[in-house]
Image (cartoon, grey):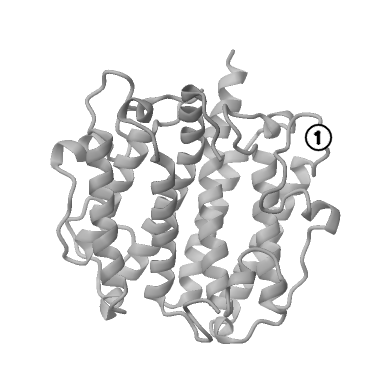
Amino acid sequence: MNQSEIFITILSRNQESTLRAIDDLSETESVLQLPGSGNCINWILGHIVSYRDGMLIDIGLNQYMHAEELVRYTAGSAPIKAGDICVDLERLSKLMTITFEDLAAWLNSDQNGLQQQPVGDVRDNIGYAGVCDTLTEHFAQNIGHESIHVGELNPLRELALGLRSK
Amino acid sequence: MSEFGNMLMDISQIFSLMLARNQSGIEASYVDLEHGESILQLPGHSNCMNWVLGHIAVYRDALLGAIDKQTYMHNKEIGIYGYGSDPIIEGSACADLTRLIEALNRGYSVLHEWLGEYPDYLDNVTPDGLIVRKGETVGQHFAHLWVHESIHVGELSALRELALVKLGKGWK
């Protein structure tokens, strides 16, 4: 097992869990809030996509989020609530799929790619690039970060389903 | 410069980094909370913090068992926190929060130290007889269980928020 296989394993599980968590949910349900100051499904999806963009830039591929979208989902950005301007769920869902396909294809096609120097400057890109010196570390940080955010989706889906049944 | 310098990270370093991230998330989740707050329920059918922490501890035992290390959860606890077990609600039999924290910390220490030794063992066949076996090699087993653990760590955020709201405090 090499580094690429580990990243594919984790990224694939993240993707499956994400699609399961948002399956059949509506736009309105994607901005529901749990008690406290956690983030809604919409914010979490946008945040994950923005970090995937960071990995795509580092391997010389195109990013997908526009600058005005990116700023809405960066670390520390304000929570998204009903009525706030945000990217719609359908677009976020498509971006989740496209970024996954691009990253998985790259990891599958170039087993030695992670040993290469980043194409971009990792220090300037999205995610944990600012604290990483190598592509492998950037991927490890971003994909590990992503898994935790994927877990945050589960109670938010339960909230949406619970409200439907009332 | 990060601690990893200008080199390709070893697989054990990748696991070590993810383990540390998970452990940090776990520790942040229960700060200033007591056992009673660990069994609060969110809307819907998700699990409480106590169940999630116990479940992570059971699966960490599956990591420890794969590398022939001591495990920390007892059989009765495995029944309470294993996959598909009943939700824990107020009055349910469960382990005390301090006991779960102890098991998680011990497991973390052993795994962290073992990964720091850059073991070749990751290419070995995953032994039979574990609570859960996910992958033919120990490395594959670890990768699957790592993402499983991370996703459950993510569930802790909303549960901490809930506890803090109940206590009249903010998250950050």
Q: Nearer the viewer, residue B121 or A1?
A: B121
Residue at x 57% of width, y 33% of height: A157
Viewer can see residue B37: yes
Q: Nearer the viewer, residue B129 or B70?
A: B70
Q: Which chain does the numbered disc 1 sit on?
A: A
Viewer can see residue B137: no
Q: Nearer the viewer, residue B27 or B32?
A: B32
Instruction: Indicate left or right for A138 with A47 as reference.
Output: left
- Number of numbered discs present? 1
Residue A102: x, y in percent?
68, 67
Figure check: B1 above or below B34? below
Badge 1 crowding class, 10 Å Cα cut-off, few under 14, some 14 to 19, many 20 or more, is: few
Instruction: Indicate left or right for B49 with A27 as reference.
Output: left
| Label 1 element class | loop
Residue at x 52% of width, y 54% of height: A147
Residue B172: x, y in percent?
56, 40
Residue B41: x, y in percent?
43, 24
Q: The disc labelled 1 sits on which kind of residue? A: Asp
The image quarter in which residue B54 lies: top left
Instruction: Indicate left or right for A84 with A150 as reference.
Output: right
Instruction: Indicate left or right for A99 with A136 as reference.
Output: right
The image quarter in which residue B82 lies: top left
Residue at x 70% of width, y 58% of height: A50
Residue A146: x, y in percent?
56, 55
- Quadrant holding the N terminus of chain A: bottom left
Figure check: B32 above or below A52? above
Q: Which residue is mark 1?
A: A84
- Quadrant holding the C terminus of chain A: top right
Residue at the limit of the structure toward the top, as seen here: A166
Figure check: B15 above or below A65? below
